[in-house]
Image (cartoon, rainbow, N blue to C red):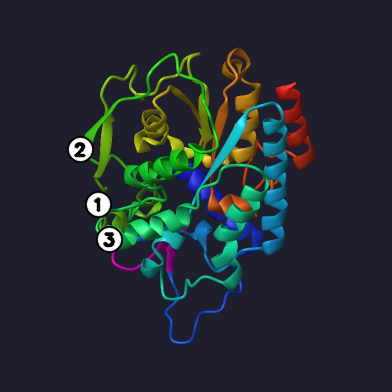
Amino acid sequence: MAADLSRRTALRTGLGLSAGLATPPGARAATIMNGVVVGKNGWLFLAFDDPRQASSARLGQVTKIINDAVGLIRARGIECAILVAPAKARVYPEFLPEDWTFSPEAAQRYGLAVEGLRAGGAVVPDLAQVFAAQRRSAPGEALYFRNDIHWTPAAAELAATDLVAQLSPRLRLPPSRAPGTRLGERVQMPGTENDLLNLLPAPERSKYQVEPFLVRRPLAAAGRDALVQDDAADVAVVGNSFAQPKYNLAPMISSLLNRPVSLSWENHLKGPYRVLLDYLRGAGFKRHRPKLIVWNIIEQDFGLLPSDGRAFPNNAIPADEFLSGIGQALA
């Protein structure tokens, strides 16, 4: 994970997106160490997530590519939902450094992405609005880790809940041959690592603590990851490290839908495009096509084309090749 984050930081620097940004009058410049941005009150952010930069033109390009992919999948009778994880900076802007304020384009990026993806036919929850409402109603509940780029299981649970609520009036799944994952009450788990801490120099790292978190433990699960991954699953979650088992996204979707849900995830270096394409080319998809694919991506992906080799080393792919590959995998 640390290598993944370092690559993203290098990408930001290589693109020149952090250069030449003016500091607001009276604001102190952010302290940045190894790509980690020191925020307020013990919060850390990743330099890659700079909220001062966004491109409306790039947003339009990426949205079209994703919509084209969704169109190909839906044409084969498979419904699509897209979970766009908001940037941590968007959810907790009050903890950003003084000179890290959202540019007008960056401020609109998430909402425009959701609007554009919905126009393409996918079910797309507005998680930025969902999380903002949760922060107002339960301000003490952590939705992102202070010292990690990821959301907490509580945020993943909110995402799953809103997704299923939006799916219910639109998608009529047949009765499942197997039940969903059973989840218990929330229990506190000790933290094992926070990825941003791994990037800090050792003397600075000692100033922070690895964070514990609350999670609903699966009650009758097979295997360490507590996911049902067999041919009974007609719902598939495909995504990045926000979908990894410890955040409970797929088990929560399984529990709410009361049916098995499979999971295919990779770290962000592989990129959302290659992850989806690899899943569609995989043996599991060929054996048993799902009725619904839930594609998990992050807000920052709307600044990255599939062909960007600096973002996705060894996994970059031209947009037309990505789309033709999807068509071939579905044929």
Residue 296 x %, y %: 52, 40
Residue 327 located left or right of residue 55: right
Q: Identify the secondary structure beneath mark 2.
A: strand
Residue 286 located left or right of residue 207: right
Q: Residues within 10 Å of mark 1 (few under 14, many from 20)?
A: some
Disc 2 designates what residue? Answer: 187
Height in image: 301 above or below 77?
Answer: below
Q: Which residue is drawn at 48% across and 87% down?
A: 25
Disc 3 designates what residue? Answer: 139
Q: Give the range drawn in magenta.
A: 31-42
Q: Residue at x 51, y 58 (%)?
A: 49
Q: Identify the secondary structure beneath mark 1.
A: loop
Q: How far apart are marks 3 and 1 (CA)?
A: 21 Å
Question: Amino acid type of disc 3?
Answer: Pro
Q: Residues within 10 Å of mark 2 (few under 14, many from 20)?
A: few
Circles 3 and 2 in contact, beta carbons < 8 Å: no
Disc 1 designates what residue? Answer: 209
